[in-house]
Amino acid sequence: MEDKRMAAEASIKYIKDGMTVGLGSGSTVNFMLEQLAERVKEGLKIKGIPSSLKTERYAKQLGIPLIDFSKTTKIDIAIDGADEVDPNLHLLKGGGGSLVREKIVDRAADKLIIIADSSKIVSKLGEFPLPVEVLPFGFEVTTEQIAAGGCTPVLRKKDGQPFVSDNGNYILDCKFNSIEDPLALHEKLKCITGVVETGLFPQMAHKVIVARDGRIDILHR
Ligand SMILES: O=C(CO)[C@H](O)[C@H](O)COP(=O)(O)O
């Protein structure tokens, strides 16, 4: 937890006065929100665009000013977490189930900074089951088609019921073990009707701030 907090703190210096800031999701991002709220109290002027309802609620509770995404398409910087980061800075995300909105916000940003502890750094993506958001309609068929690609999709559940994303969809956690080509796999999955989005974020991160045993490393693409 301390490393997540450190990585979060190291990202704050990239947020400058006047910026529109994409706010990712997850426990590491929550540390960033807490520190950002402190800067806002000290006078930093920013507008946040949250990437999930959870982040929106927490940012509001902390007093971070938000702007309606329908009012702007320009995001200066986005700060987000990740479940896995490979040596090319390709990301696997969506452990918290917010991958679609995260991808929209992160892609819209001029710069995407990922904050993580060292447990997220891997040589190959895929040990963490890949979250794939699918439409509830016909999801059994979609599941079969995804499984034919060489993985075991498991419908994410919460309190015994299917987990429902902020967009009203289901999440399939797909264990691939090792993903050779993240971009190719993403494109293949996106061709399946019923797949809304995958948790693969290839070629998106500009910087990854990693904290390991109290030390910060910055990885660049
Ligand atoms: O992609 C995400 C949510 O959909 C998160 O960024 C990812 O799961 C990392 O979470 P945490 O910071 O809690 O380890």
Image: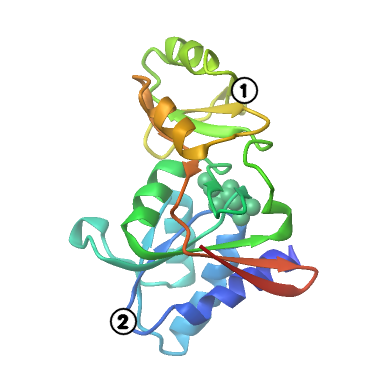
Whether residue 218 is situated above or below residue 156 in the rendered picture: below
Whether residue 56 is situated above or below residue 188 in the rendered picture: below
Question: Which residue occupies the extreme bottom position in the image?
Answer: 42
Kindly indicate the quadrant of the structure image that contains residue 46: bottom left
Name the spot of residue 4 as percent of width and height, x first: 68, 64
Which of the pair 193/135 is nearer the observer?
A: 193
The type of residue carrying mark 2 is Gly
Circle 1 SS class: loop
Name the spot of residue 37 as percent of width and height, x first: 49, 76
Residue at 69% in and 36% down = 127
Circle 2 SS class: loop
Which of the pair 126/78 is nearer the observer?
A: 126
Residue at 38% in and 28% down = 190
Q: Which mark is residue 31?
A: none
Specify the quadrant that holds the N terminus.
bottom right
Q: Coloring scheme of the render? A: rainbow
Distance between the alpha carbons at the discs numbered 1 and 2: 44 Å
Disc 1 crowd, CA 10 A, few/some/many (<14, 14-19, 20+): few
Name the spot of residue 88 as percent of width and height, x first: 56, 53
- Residue 185 lies left or right of residue 10; in this view the side is left
Residue at 65% in and 42% down = 124
Q: Which mark is residue 18?
A: 2
The type of residue carrying mark 1 is Gly
Give whichever of discs 1 and 2 has the lower sequence position. Answer: 2
> In the rendered image, which residue does mark 1 sit on?
160
